[in-house]
Image (cartoon, rainbow, N blue to C red):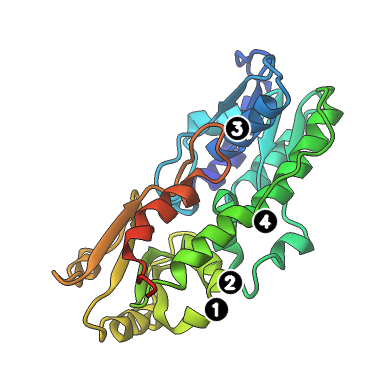
């Protein structure tokens, strides 16, 4: 990656003067949103956050600019997330470790997180704000780190991951025709919540760095399209080849959703919105 190679050139920037206030800086906007959620729950008006990168679309395709790398290297307190989400943070953190005055908090996956969703692709579940169990796990880790920074928090929050998962599962098992996801950020969640529908849920594009559609995913798409009707879930900001989009037929239904960011003070806003949009397509029970 060009920006990662640039790190070797930018080592000298560590010593340069950069203006930072008393703020917690993040390597991903959703980490900052999580911090603000914790502050909201604990009535901590003094916590300020700022994401040092402007990510749109799939974070796995994003590479920081030279200016963003400079800011990431120099931030007094930097919060970074799972390596699978932003692999470039590993070299950022390595550079930061050479400056003893800088504080870096890495909220990483552990074995429990990897096993939270059976057979899940690690890059897919790194969209942690889409995976309630993982979100709650990382949130508790972040709360512990904020305490170590001197912030007075209540005991670890009770994070209810069951409600959003139960609501989504109820919807998925009652949509009786195939579902095609343009991107696999949600695929492990769907397959774990509705394993009985595994043969009818397919994702086109993978979450690996710059990963495109594979022959296997294309074959599964065509199998799904053998049905007279398909429900497409199209993630906004994800680049999907036009020849794939052209496969959408007049008889199909398309749901568009922005999975790149959530709403303030609503941990699972993306999933809540998805449930709302999918509910009308549930098969009504007699």
Who comes first in sequence, dot 4 or dot 2?
A: 4
Q: Are marks 4 and 2 in contact (CB under 8 Å)?
A: no
Q: Secondary structure at mark 4?
A: helix
According to the image, label 4 marks what residue? Answer: 133
In which quadrant is the C terminus drawn? bottom left
Who comes first in sequence, dot 1 or dot 4?
A: 4
The span from disc 4 to disc 3 (Cα, nearest Å) is 19 Å
Q: Are marks 1 and 2 in contact (CB under 8 Å)?
A: yes
Point out residue 156 in the picture as x, y percentages from the top left corner. 81, 39
Point out residue 9 in the picture as x, y percentages from the top left corner. 57, 37
Residue 257 or residue 242, whichever sits in front: 257
Point out residue 278 in the picture as x, y percentages from the top left corner. 37, 59
Visible residue check, residue 12: no
Label drawn at residue 192: 2
Q: Label 2 neighbourhood size at 10 Å, few (<14), some (14-19), many (20+)?
A: some
Visible residue check, residue 154: yes
Q: Are marks 1 and 3 in contact (CB under 8 Å)?
A: no
According to the image, label 3 marks what residue? Answer: 32
- In the image, residue 260 sits, relative to residue 153, either above or below, namely below
According to the image, label 1 marks what residue? Answer: 195
């Amino acid at each position: 990656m060009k920006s990662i190679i640039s790190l070797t050139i930018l080592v000298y920037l560590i010593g340069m003067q950069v203006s930072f206030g008393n703020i917690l800086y993040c390597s991903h906007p959703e980490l900052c949103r999580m911090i603000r959620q914790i502050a909201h729950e604990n009535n901590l008006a003094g916590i300020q956050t700022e994401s040092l990168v402007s990510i749109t679309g799939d974070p796995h395709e994003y590479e920081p600019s030279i200016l963003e790398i400079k800011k990431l290297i120099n931030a007094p307190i930097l919060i970074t997330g799972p390596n699978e989400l932003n692999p470039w943070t590993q070299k950022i953190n390595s550079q930061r470790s050479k400056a003893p005055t800088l504080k870096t908090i890495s909220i990483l996956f552990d074995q429990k997180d990897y096993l939270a969703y059976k057979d899940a692709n690690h890059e897919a579940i790194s969209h942690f704000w889409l995976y309630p169990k993982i979100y709650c796990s990382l949130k508790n880790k972040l709360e512990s780190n904020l305490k170590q920074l001197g912030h007075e928090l209540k005991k670890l929050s009770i994070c209810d991951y069951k409600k959003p998962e139960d609501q989504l599962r109820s919807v998925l098992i009652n949509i009786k025709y195939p579902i095609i996801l343009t991107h696999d950020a949600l695929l492990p969640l769907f397959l774990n919540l509705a394993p009985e529908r595994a043969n009818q849920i397919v994702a086109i594009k993978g979450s690996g760095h710059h990963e495109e559609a594979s022959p296997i995913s294309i074959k599964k798409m065509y199998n799904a399209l053998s049905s007279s009707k398909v429900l497409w879930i199209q993630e906004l900001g994800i680049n999907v080849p036009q020849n794939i989009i052209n496969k959408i037929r007049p008889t199909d239904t398309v749901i568009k959703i922005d999975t790149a960011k959530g709403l303030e003070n609503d941990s699972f806003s993306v999933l809540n919105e998805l449930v709302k949009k999918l509910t009308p397509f549930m098969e009504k029970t007699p």
